[in-house]
Amino acid sequence: MSKEIPYKIYLEESEMPKAWYNLRADMKKKPAPLLNPGTHKPMTAEELSVVFCDELVKQELDNDTKFYEIPQEIRDFYKMYRPSPLVRAYCLEKKLGTPAHIYYKFEGNNTSGSHKLNSAIAQAYYAKKQGLKGVTTETGAGQWGTALSMACSYFDLDCKVFMVKVSYEQKPFRREVMRTYGASVTPSPSETTNVGKKILAEHPGTTGSLGCAISEAVEVAVGTPGYRYVLGSVLNQVLLHQSVIGLETKAALDKYGIKADIVIGCAGGGSNLGGLIAPFMGEKLRGEADYRIIAVEPASCPSLTRGVYAYDFCDTGMVCPLAKMYTLGSDFIPAPNHAGGLRYHGMSSILSELYDQGLMEARSVKQTEVFEAAETFARVEGILPAPESSHAIKAAIDEALKCKETGEEKNIVFGLTGTGYFDMVAYEKFHDGKMDDYIPTDEELAKFRARLPKVD
């Protein structure tokens, strides 16, 4: 190779993507449309605009436009923390004794501590452009709520966040960052909404889930004039905005003549994974190159590896549209694991369709194994990773060790979605030996699957 590969590969500001890439445009078989839960007919733009911003509805429904120009105001905001570095994990490679080359795209260099800001600023921009007063949302681990509160503060929008109760209790400082940026934060499920009261009545003492929080946020958005709901993952529009991650990653690799062999991302609703793999999957779909693409999810919430591909509600309260996706059932509430951002019952329709076609792999990993990998990484790479990101770290280490056995010199790329400095309760439980590995039984999952909506 003609160029020596540095520890950190940075793009110049002028090399930043000027357009988001819409992966659906290269999919021969498109993701199934969202359905109206009452009529089971495809949702129209008019129906969706009651919940979402008009421009975001357009992006959500557009399966054909390959590139969306990033508005200059968003690009200017991106410059505060982008382009983010692609890091060669030399120290981790040495620790593992592997011939593999390991790279990670680090998205934690902003106050929100994660990749979520890439879509938050876009959604806040379109809400402001539409003349709205504010937005509502949900957040699991807190990264999305933090990112959205930052974006809303930038555009002087009100921000109402429903935070999954287990994370609200485990991560009080994440909550306070949101409040610092002016957001109101409510633990979900709560007594402040009708759907929250219903969920609490049916599941007394529940620690909540992303599905619960989504239901509450949608109820408030629809019932409050001048507000719309915005979502941090799952939806097509979010994966579109997050494609900036993969576009930068691909450009950085190309700059040094590096061809990725394996691309790995953690998988909750799909925002990070979908954004990271977008240009790589695009090449695969077009027959220009081939990659192994691996989605990694928690064993306690295994939507891809143990779910079913079917239409289901996007939320626990059953007020949102139906999406065809790999799902555990909309009323499935996972054990209170410490990867709050991965506690979602379903998966992006785009990623679900790609997985169903066999274009990507999926694996589930246990919580204690994830934190073992996180600790290994932190000790040699100098970054304390978020529990969500650590799922990808675990798989990357596993693949690197396979290369050690075979002697293969593969290029492994994974997404380091953010930092874990607000996750110290989780690290404490791991270090004290108080972390468990709860995995739902087949009988439990069958019970939730039986309640899936019947769609012809």
Image: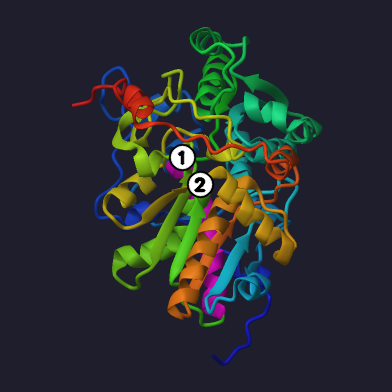
Q: Is residue 13 magenta?
A: no
Q: How is the image coloured?
A: rainbow
Predominant secondary structure, magenta span: helix
Look at the numbered discs 1 and 2 and tell me whether their residues touch, using CB distance below 8 Å.
yes
Residue in view at x 63 percent, y 87 percent: 4
**Which of these two is toward me, 326 or 442?**
442
**Which of these two is toward me, 89 or 134?**
89
Q: What is the residue that sits farthest to the front in this orientation?
A: 433
Q: What is the residue that sits farthest to the bottom in this orientation?
A: 2
Tag 2, which secondary structure? helix
Residue in view at x 41 percent, y 61 percent: 293
One can see residue 143 in this view = yes
**Please, what is the three-letter code of the amino acid marked with disc 2?**
Ser
Q: In which quarter of the image is residue 48?
A: top left
Q: Quadrant of the N terminus?
A: bottom right
Kindly identify which residue carries mark 1. 234
Q: Earlier in the sequence, mark 1 or mark 2?
A: 1
240 lies left or right of 40: right
299 lies left or right of 417: left
x and y percentages locating residue 248 in the rendered image: 56, 65
Which portion, as a residue range, is magenta? 235-255
Residue in view at x 58 percent, y 11 percent: 193
Give the vertical position of 322 relative to 193 (above or below). Answer: below
x and y percentages locating residue 219 in the rendered image: 52, 17
- Sort mark 1 into few (<14), some (14-19) or many (20+) by Cα contacts within 10 Å: many
x and y percentages locating residue 271 in the rendered image: 51, 46
Kindly identify which residue carries mark 2. 271
